[in-house]
Image (spheres, helix red, strand yellow):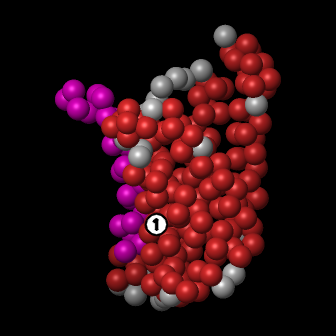
Amino acid sequence: MQFLKRNYGWIIVSILASLPIIPLSELYFNGGIENVDMLYHISGEFAIRWMTAVLTCTPFFIVFNITNLFVRQAMGIATAVWSFLHFVIFIWAEGFFETFKQFNYIAGFIVVLLLIPMFFTSNRKSMKWLKSKWKKLQRFVYVAIILSLVHVAILEKTWLVYAIIVGVGFIIRVPLVKEKITAVMT
């Protein structure tokens, strides 16, 4: 029971992140999804949704005065897993060398490369080992979200919604805005 109390956030995020895989795989293997293209589009949507959600955590914490919630790590891992899955499905459908034929694919590939070290260092041992460098490494997520938005914008998908959410989140992080929100909330 102690395990559940300490890790309920991780468990909830893991379940939420895993749930879409079940119907997707069922649809694909039962012929509901005719081609792999649909799988990589759907996996890409979930990747950017998780990335947007994880970047929304800090503004959410600022607005609602929540501190030290490790759910953000689990959400970051879900982001990386969905991004890796998206990339693997893309390679399966299009081939690895297609990655370098269009700027938006290159941007997506760079995002995957940026997420690899963040994924493998999203644990407490790495935090202790890397110390202040860990936080610097994790800040590459800002580059990753910008490149992800470019990737999605060029593909003309629903990028504007994600851009607005992330943009508002960045505004809330600005020290002056953060101070005013914190003053109102206390």
Indicate whether 86 appears above or below 121. Answer: below
x and y, in percent, of residue 176 in the image: 80, 23
Quadrant in which the N terminus is drawn: top left
Q: Residue at x 74, y 53 (%)?
A: 163
In magenta stretch: residue 6? yes
Q: Residue at x 58, y 62 (%)?
A: 111
Residue 91 position within the rendered picture, expressed as x and y whole percent measured from the top left = 49, 82
Q: Is residue 14 left or right of residue 69?
A: left
Q: Is residue 14 left or right of residue 185?
A: left
Name the image quarter holding residue 26: bottom left
Q: Is residue 185 magenta?
A: no
Q: Which residues make up the magenta segment?
A: 1-25
Note whether residue 158 is visible.
Answer: no
Please provide percent x and percent y for residue 136: 57, 40
Q: Position of residue 113 (x, y in %)?
A: 53, 63
Which image quadrant is residue 125 in? top left
Specify the amino acid type for callout 1. Answer: Phe
Magenta segment's dominant SS is helix
Residue tagged 1: 84
